[in-house]
Image (spheres, rainbow, N blue to C red):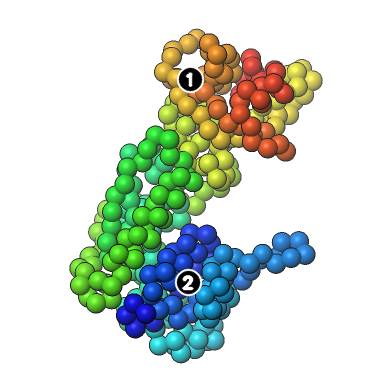
Amino acid sequence: MKNNNKIVFFGSDENSAKLLDELIQANYNIELVITKTSKKTGRSQKQNPVKKIASQRSIKIIEKDGLNDSESITILENTNARLAILLSYGTIIPQKILNLFPLGIINIHPSFLPKYRGPSPVQTALLNGDSETGVSIMLLSKKMDAGSIIIQEKINIEPEDNHETLNQKLFSLGNKLLINNLDKYINNEIQIHHQDNNQATYAKMFEKKDGLIDWHNSAEKINNKIRAFYNWPGAYTYFDNKPQHLTKCRGKLLKIIEANINDQKTNHQIGEVFMNNDQIAIQTKNKLLCPLIVQIEGKQKTNINSFVNGYKNFIGSILK
């Protein structure tokens, strides 16, 4: 084993499964894995990816949806672990658990703290049109994302990045940073530093309603929303595919999955869909937003040309 320090690992999703696998491959001594209970899907039970990795490596697994019980304390005390690592576990860690580990609980946070503390830092960076973000390897504390920083690194946000691609880049970098610096931290060879709470900003928890597009916004702001909400809740508008005099409903929900921006100036109404040369365009406050991939409710994602073939009255409609 790479040093004899026992490590407890907390995690439940694909990102945490990748980190667990990389820690095992780097020969770290994972004494115990704590993960959320596997969810039932229909008649079967879907095994979460962290449990799958731990099972393959014969590591002891505890499935826990909460840690506020005496059993959890006893289990963790009996590991005699000095350090824990947590990524996307899905449950708040109580102070009595934080106090069990002399070297603390390490977490990967996908922002350059103290900027964007909270549950949605990657989406917020994209939504705000930031040109860079980063990863912080930090220690958990009682206050959300306010713990001391072990190491940080910045990366550029590319124009084509969306929530999925940027998330992958950040957690890949985070895994690398953690593994490359873990021994230094354990051996007290790295200088940690406290965050400046006065500089802290926060990323809120988004709701489905946040994805609604306001066509009176700039094309840049709308495209940032499309990129930020790529996975959830989706950036959406409403398209009524029936003649206006036949219905008073707001139409079907139409997600715009991917788009680009055309700087051309036109005299079209805001929200109007029209052909601009060979490109389908929607007029915004300032420029044209050109959808590339869309998804109408009840259907699969499709490219815009295939969509228009099925909904020919999309051209000329006004999106509200």
Q: Is residue 168 left or right of residue 132?
A: right
Q: Position of residue 90 (x, y in %)?
A: 52, 65
Direction right: furthest residue = 246
Q: Which residue is mark 2?
A: 10
- The residue type indicated by label 2 comes to Phe
Q: Quadrant of residue 208?
A: top right
Residue at x 56%, y 46% (from the top left corner): 232
**Amino acid type, callout 1:** Leu
The picture quadrant where one finds residue 141 is bottom left
Judge the density around disc 2: few (<14), some (14-19), many (≥20) Cα neighbours within 10 Å.
many
Q: Position of residue 199 (x, y in %)?
A: 27, 53
Q: CA distance from mark 2 to mark 1?
A: 46 Å
| Front in this rendered view, residue 8 or 27 | 27
Disc 1 marks which residue? 288
171 relative to 99, above or below: above
Task: Report the quarter where the C terminus lies.
Answer: top right
Viewer-side residue, 128 vs 307 = 307
Residue 87 showing in the rendered view: no
Seen in the picture, residue 83 relative to 171 is either above or below; the reply is below
Residue 128 seen: yes
124 or 82, which lies in front?
A: 82
Give the foreground label among 2 and 1: 2
Element assignment for label 2: strand
| Residue 60 picture location, percent across and down | 53, 81
- How many numbered markers are drawn? 2
Toward which corner of the image does residue 301 lie, by quadrant?
Answer: top right
